[in-house]
Image (cartoon, grey):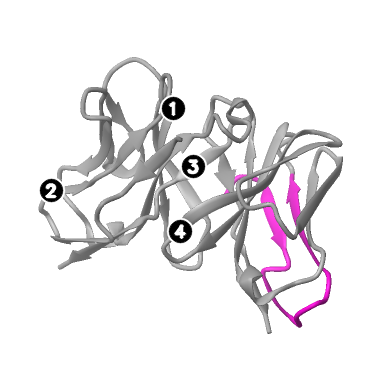
């Protein structure tokens, strides 16, 4: 896999607690994305970033926030986790907006 | 609204036979189309893309896809399937609604390919 590391890889958390997922890249790519994967829905975009401190919402952004203080790190925060946020979360990076994105290994989050 | 459809939840093929995984799309403007593959408990791996140029695109692991503008399709194909090709396949199109200029993608729901010996 291209130099993308997601942490943690697995997490179980309780409803109402805040959770932060980390995406770290070593490729110095400008664009970074957070997607969630759910059965029957494919992957859906949560938030994306087009540079340090430049972020915007995706299709399913409610209940999520992001931050990018350094090129290499893109953090996804669930403000107050709910059971509907149980999912597999993927980070992706892209060198250029017209090229293909590369994906991390994913984080499996379970909210109980 | 932009969308991607993968009409088959599952495709079953015998090893050595040709395989096709279907994808149709709906976009305004010129489509940027992608195929990805996901093996169990792994992230998505890029297979191939169509941006412009030849309608037949060749990609990784012997896969190819044919872009058909009149039918708005981008079907994934392989002449001879392998058991190791068994995986989940996703078609995607660049999303112009949510910052498509930043490379965001809309994905189909995925097609599970099962290749039997």
Q: Give the quadrant of residue B84.
A: bottom left
Q: CA distance from mark 2 to mark 1?
A: 25 Å
Marks 2 and 1 belong to one chain: yes
Chain holding disc 4: A
The image's mark for residue A27 is: none
Q: CA distance from mark 4 to mark 1?
A: 20 Å
Q: CA distance from mark 3 to mark 1?
A: 11 Å
Question: In the figure, is residue A48 to the left or right of B72?
Answer: right
From the viewer's side, name the closer residue of B15 and A61.
Answer: A61
In the rendered structure, which segment of residues is drawn in magenta? A1-25
Q: Identify the residue position indicated by label 2 in the image.
A: B18
Q: CA distance from mark 3 to mark 2?
A: 27 Å
Q: CA distance from mark 3 to mark 4?
A: 11 Å
Q: Give the quadrant of residue B34.
A: top left
Residue B103 in magenta? no
Residue at left offset 41%, top offset 19%? B30
Labels in figure, total: 4
Q: Identify the residue position indicated by label 3 in the image.
A: B106
Q: Give the quadrant of residue B4.
A: top left
Quarter of the image that includes the C terminus of chain A: bottom right
- Mark closer to the chain start, 3 or 1: 1
The image's mark for residue A41 is: 4
Marks 3 and 1 belong to one chain: yes
Chain holding disc 1: B
- Mark closer to the chain start, 2 or 1: 2
Question: In the figure, is residue A34 to the left or right of B53?
Answer: right
The image's mark for residue B32 is: 1
Marks 3 and 4 belong to one chain: no
Q: Report x, y in % for residue A45.
A: 60, 48
């Amino acid at each position: 896999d291209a130099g993308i590391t997601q942490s943690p890889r697995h997490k179980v958390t309780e409803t109402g607690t805040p959770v932060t997922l980390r995406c770290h890249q070593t490729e110095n790519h400008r664009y970074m994305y957070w997607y969630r994967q759910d059965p029957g829905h494919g992957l859906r975009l949560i938030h994306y970033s087009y540079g340090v401190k430049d972020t915007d919402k995706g299709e399913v952004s409610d209940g999520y926030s992001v931050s990018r203080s350094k090129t290499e790190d893109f953090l996804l925060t669930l403000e107050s986790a709910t059971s509907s946020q149980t999912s597999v979360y993927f980070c992706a990076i892209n060198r250029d907006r017209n090229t293909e994105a590369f994906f991390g290994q994913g984080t499996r989050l379970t909210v109980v | 609204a932009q969308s991607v459809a993968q009409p088959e939840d599952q495709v079953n093929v015998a090893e050595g036979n040709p395989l096709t995984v279907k994808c149709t799309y709906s976009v305004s403007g010129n489509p940027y189309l992608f195929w990805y593959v996901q093996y169990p408990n792994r992230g998505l791996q890029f297979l191939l893309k169509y941006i412009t140029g030849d309608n037949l695109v060749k990609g990784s692991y012997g896969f190819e896809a044919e872009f058909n503008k009149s039918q708005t399709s981008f079907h994934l194909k392989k002449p001879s399937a392998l058991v190791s090709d068994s995986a989940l396949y996703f078609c995607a199109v660049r999303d112009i609604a949510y910052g498509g200029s930043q490379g965001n993608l809309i994905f189909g729901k995925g097609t599970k390919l099962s290749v039997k010996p």
